Amino acid sequence: MILDSHDLPDGHTLQAEVCIIGAGAAGIAMALDFVGTGIDVLMLEAGGRTEESDTQALYAGSVVDARMHSPPDRYRQRRLGGTTTIWGGRCMPFDAIDFEARDYVPHSGWPLAREALLPYYARANPLCEAGEFAYTAEEAFHRPTRPIIDGFSSGNFTADTLERFSCPTDFAARYGHKLEAAQNVRTLLHANVTHVQLNAAGRAVDHLIVRNLRGQRFTVRAANFVLATGGLEVARLLLASRDVQQQGIGNQHDVVGRYYMCHIAGTIGAIKIDRPPASVWHGYEISDEGIYCRRRFALRETVQRSLGIGNFVGRLHHPRISNPEHRNAVLSLLFLAQLIIPYEYRVRLAGAESTRLAEWLRHIRNVVLGSTDAAGFAWHMLRDRRLAERKFPTIIIHSKANLYSLDFHAEQQPNPSSRVGLSAEPDALGMPRISVDWRYTAGDVDTVSRAVALLAEDFRRQRIGTFDYDPDSVETEMTRYGAFGGHHIGTARMGADPRSSVVNADCRLHDVGNLFIASSATFPTSSQANPTLTVVAFALRLSAHLKSLMRPPQTRAAAAVEPLECA
Amino acid sequence: VKPRILVLGATGFIGKRVLEALWSSDWALPIAASRRRMKHAGADRPEAVQLDATDAGQLRRAMEGVSGVVNCVLGDSRTIVEGARALFSVAGGMPQPPRIVHFSSLAIYGEAAGDVDESAAPVGRLSAYGAAKFETERLAAANPSVVTLRPGIVYGPGGAQWSGRIAQLLYAHRLGDLGRGGDGYCNLVYIDDVAEAVLRALRLPNVESKAFNLSLPDPPTWNQYLGRYAAALGAVPVKRISQRRLRLESKLMAPPQKIAEILAGKLSPRLVARLPQPIPPSLVRLFQQEIRMKVGLAEQCLGLRWTPLEEGLSRTAAWYRPKVSSSVVANSLAPR
């Protein structure tokens, strides 16, 4: 059932066996997994069913360098469904190499291998409505599919792996009815956790302090607690609860909030493919289950190892929209449409530079001259994106002139100096706001520089076409829009050593026996992959772990057997 | 001498398959009964009688000398209830009442959710069909020789309602991935398993006065069923059907489509087949109903084993595919 803290008496104490903090991708995935188990679960959601400006304002904070990171109340949603209410839906699993300790990536290595996650990836995929867990063209399609570029074959990159797209599924809209109907899972709205109270010994969570914006205050007690918020809020809650462990919970070794990663992403170069336009396909294929799938150029693991660089993927992309020189009506239409596109999608579309009046006029001219193309595109976006429940994922523009750029998404290396801390300024509930100091390293520049150079060299050697870019512009391009928005990783990293990590392989705090984290905060490295699918897989792994702790399999089996009478 | 078994409603989907199963058994002599005229008995087909199953006099004559009756009568609520009333009263009046296998339905559980076994009471509002079946079970309670079967969604070759209609809607991309609208469980049971249940219910001891749920023990959701069936049919890629579209179909389109179907039915059955199938609100509600029938009793008392879903779907798809024109299949498979 779904309850609202506004309907509870002030000072009320709630009890549960498991308390999940946050009803986003991780929290809802776990809550659904507990439905019907008989385990009494309470899920606390800070927001309501829709965005509320005063609740959303609790996410506001400061950024040390505003060019490098979006404001903290952007790209995340404090409401039922969390950030799944606005996400883009791109799903892909982490690669095997991401879990390895790589001597050329400082602070890398997970306390588990990818195999440990595979059973949960298989369940996470349909939960995200991204179909079956099949991430190569061969596995996903039982028919031939179009290559990105006919004849492209490289020892450096594979074009056979896929990204698959969720609807994108808003977990609240999709699964809210299951939460409503659940007998053993209560979801409490407007329940902001403002303090995690440890017991006197600091070895277990005793209770949570929960407040709402109407001034009511509640206490929540449970046997086990799961912090299922995003990567920024995990650090905030742990650091702000510092009455027993004075550095903040789990922070004796100054790890919480550090190693903060997003992804390194950008668009670079001018690609001209010397093949017939029909031999280039940078768009989507639809699998039999109806899922949009897309190939990309993925840097092979052997090459990452031999060059000592991080993980990297690239996609053919349209030329930069903001420059009207492309003379493309659709691109100019998109440029003009920025006024009605949400912030999170507008940033990388429109460009960071201010636009002069003359350029605006030239964009308008492009649209007028190519009005048929522009109208066709507008109709496609209306039918296949705006009105569709399974949305056409991104903007794909086939160039008749075979002109493209490279859109890349690369691993960011863990760096203790890149961090999320607390500011002195409190929010409306008295919680200190966060301060974000995101930083990248020379290693990150090196990953992108060398991967892009390899691809350009592959194009040249195979006579695919030309890939012109200024090698000195790589750092500028990868930071043009700052850190990739919405991917908040590494602030409570997982590891075997409490001196360099916050949680163990079970996602439990090393020194707090009943506090677990289901969040991208626990990822020690960032991969090339978007984090949501892996967040959901870890959440399902954690709920399975908690179920086995609280209801060992043998007691469940015994309860299930009921004698039936035939006579 | 083989015992004579009367199959009422022998021209329907279930009745026909039950008749075949009895005919090919080595222990029963089936007699087909239906409102419709059937071909006369011969070496390759059983004896047939045309009758109105709600007419006790006609039933009494047909039931003379039979040791078992299978009640698969279809029709409106009145036909269902009156047919059952007549059957039970005639049987009750016979010196040696025959074993009756009576078909009830998943619909008697109403709006129930969660796991339901045979002892579960109906929840919420019953559909007209569910209420009629519920009433027949009440009538059956007075007759100790009745075995009641409550099948879920009976599918398989020849099934117009759950196989033919659904296939047509999948090819037309009017059904597919229904999102939250398809989270209900699809309590599928393959037609051959239903026929096998009947045969066992006719002969086994200690099953009288009992009711048995019939369904796959771990049923898929409707979304999973529609996806797998579409794949088996080649009606891919599966289309996401929005909640808005489902509402439009069931609330706005279905009533006129139903009226057109009724009117066309008066003119020509061929015309009906060419009309688009309505998706009524009751179907949309069923797609969402998270009810799972427990079938331990049927497994234990009737010794039933279930045809795996993939096997049942592949046989069903093989039956339906030739009905579809090649252009529809080609359209469906074309990349979009």
Image (cartoon, coloured by chain):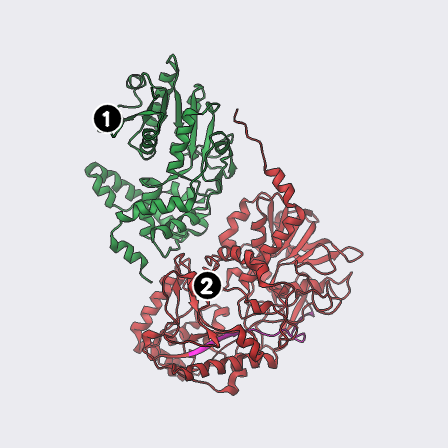
Neighbor class of circle 2 (other Cα within 10 Å; few <14, some 14-19, many 20+) is many
**Dot 2: element:** strand
Instruction: Report the residue marked by disc 1.
Output: B41
Q: Is residue A409 magenta?
A: yes
Farthest residue toward the right?
A201
Instruction: Report the residue marked by disc 2.
Output: A164
Which chain is indicated by disc 1? B
Report the predominant secondary structure element of the magenta stretch.
strand
Task: Work out whether residue A264 or residue A23 is closer to the camera in this orientation and state it.
Answer: A264
Q: Which color was chain A given?
A: red
Locate residue A262 relative to residue B147 in the image: left or right.
right
Please tell me if label 2 and label 1 are on a single chain.
no
Task: Kindly tell me whether residue B299 is visible in this rendering.
Answer: yes
Q: Which color was chain B given?
A: green
The circle on residue A170 is none
Image position, residue A389 (x, y; %) = 42, 57
Which chain is indicated by disc 2? A
Amino acid carrying label 2: it is Arg
Task: Say above or below: B243 vs A426.
Answer: above
Locate residue A425 relative to residue B35 in the image: left or right.
right
What residue do we see at 34% from left, 32% from top? B21
Farthest residue toward the top?
B95
CA separation, marks 2 and 1?
59 Å
What residue do we see at 40% from left, 79% from top? A404
Amino acid carrying label 1: it is Ala
Task: Say above or below: A48 vs A36.
Answer: below
Magenta range is: A405-424
